[in-house]
Image (cartoon, rainbow, N blue to C red):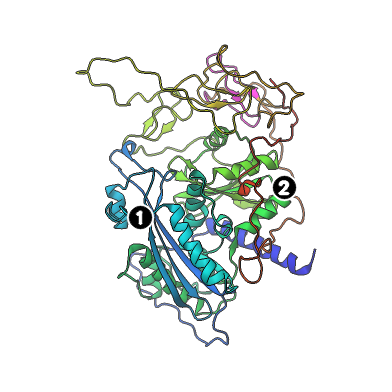
Amino acid sequence: MPEEEKQQEETNESAELEEIQAATTTSTTTTATAPEEPAAKPTTKRAVETVVPFNRLIVLNVAATCDENNGNPSSVQVTKENSEVIELSFVVIDASKMQVVHTEQIYVKPEQTPLTEYCTQVTGITTDTLESAGTLQNAINQLDDYIQREIEAHKLSFCFVTHGGWTLRIQLPREARDKNIDLPPYLSFCRMFDLKQEIQRWQVHHREVSVRSMALKDLCDTFHVDRVTDRSAGLNTCLTTVNVIRYLTDFGHPDVFVHAIDTNADLQQFKKEESKVVHLAGLPFEVTQGELEAWFSSNGLRPTATYMIQASDFSKPNLSGFVVFHAHNDAMRALSLNGRCLGDRAVEVSPSSERVIEAAGSMLVPFPAHPKARPLRPGDWNCPSCSFHNFASRRSCFKCNTENPNAPQQSSHTPAMPTPMPPPVANPPNFTPGDWMCPNYQCSFHNYASRVQCLKCGTYRPQHGSAAPAPPPSTSYGRPPITFRPGDWYCPNPACGFQNFASRASCFRCQTPNPNPTQRPPYPPAQPSYGYDSNYGYGQSGYQQHQPPAANSNYGYGPPSGANAPFRPGDWYW
């Protein structure tokens, strides 16, 4: 391996470990009575104008539809999983002089979610404002037109800057995937600086400065920089971010706004090494191993190991961790869950590696097997069958599918009417011959051909119907079903009969002990020489040398539905 490439791999791996370590240490402090500390100031004049290794920085901000109702959470009309961009703003900086060269703001009309009163209060955007707005595709085209005309055409390098990773790593990829929008390569696999991470790097050099929070308003107060308030909400955020960037880069630290996050390099190395590990960020703070396994199982995936990054700052509202799969194809398919909700949190799913897990070492602990006592919010309910804590929006228990006993009942003054059966549920895109949809219309879960009972609610597979027979071993159908493997066991409780993973000491559904407990095998040692090379597809003159993935590559979201997956030990055809 060339020395330069090896050094670049070490740089990228160090950046990922820095992110892990940030989750285990308290990088911000809150002291209500502490006297105000003076902001740090550069003490020497630098010989160069900037340390940023790009010609242009594009500060990007989006606003999206949202809703909130603490008094009645079940009435929330917009969730983090279906929110839509309603404003896209960006400011372009000449990185050599830190001067703004372009500002632009674009409104976007939502297609599937309403603009709620709460959203208008937060963003200041009204229905009238969006009346003549275009689509998300129109907004992306406007951004791309500027980049092609003013940056690519002049062979300038560029990098995005966002306040947090939500915009480029969760919202835009998820919404584009849901709406079948083809993002430009530099948005599909972006190169970016996260302002929050750069502040953490800056703070290593200035431990005397107490950063109370990462909110832009508080950052302006801490660093004594101007907060822009005379433009639209989106441009105010972008221009205020520019002021913070100027302050941080003025010190000339060799590691602040120097090492960008390169998601394309991460993905290409993930594929090259056929990694089986994905990283999860933004998990609910009290998520359990069972909830995490059920989340993946409901999407046809089956982890072999899960690790939580142990945080010392328990005031943080979310967690991160790693999930290991049996095969690389499963890990690739898991990337398509990026932006999907677990509970009320949108989870970021990104490529990772065995080497990062080994380097994390003692920072990794198992996810808790049982939930801690959780405060019930208005509308939340505990399942009368299994005592699982369910959010107010759930009509049936997430764990055992028992109906919510406190669900709104039909008015006694209205004559009871027969409940009409809903129309048949359309088969999902990955439906293969022999698979079947649960006949329980309140469930409608997609089950593999091997299952005789629904994985979600336990309803037995219908004996007669339109379901196609399972494929014989000799046929060349798609991926073999994920089913009973060595060590797995059925619950001996006659009233349950749930199929459990080999790792479970007790039944996931009813907690009956495993009649044949086995010692969980240790995690295999990490493969040597695993690192991330950030030079994949990027030239010295920006993104123009990057070639988009081939038509059958699915942009890194897993193999096509007809692709064969390896048949694993213990797998079998029904």
C-beta proximity under 8 Å, tags 1 and 2: no
* Residue farthest along the right direction in this orientation: 1
The percent coordinates of residue 77 (x first, y second) are 34, 41
Q: Is residue 326 left or right of residue 128?
A: right
Question: Main SS type for the magenta part?
Answer: loop
Whether residue 315 appears in this view of the structure is no
> What type is the residue that disc 1 sits on?
Ala
Q: Quadrant of the N terminus?
A: bottom right
Q: Secondary structure at mark 2?
A: loop
The percent coordinates of residue 307 (x first, y second) are 60, 44
Q: Which residue is mark 1?
A: 133
**Between residues 562 and 38, which one lies in front from this camera angle?**
562
**Between residues 149 and 111, which one lies in front from this camera angle?**
149
Taking the spot 57% from the left edge, 71% from the top edge, the residue there is 153
The percent coordinates of residue 6 (x first, y second) are 74, 65
Whether residue 468 appears in this view of the structure is yes
Please say if 507 is above or below 315.
Answer: above
Q: Look at discs 1 and 2 and give the one toward the viewer.
A: 1
Q: Secondary structure at mark 1?
A: loop
The percent coordinates of residue 69 (x first, y second) are 30, 43
Check disc 2: other Cα within 10 Å, few if <14, some if 14-19, many if 20+.
some
Q: Which residue is mark 2?
A: 274
Residue 349 painted magenta = no
Q: Is residue 456 left or right of residue 68?
A: right
Magenta residues, as a range? 489-510
> What type is the residue that disc 2 sits on?
Glu
The residues bearing labels 1 and 2 have C-alpha atoms spaced at a distance of: 43 Å
Quadrant assignment, res 497: top right
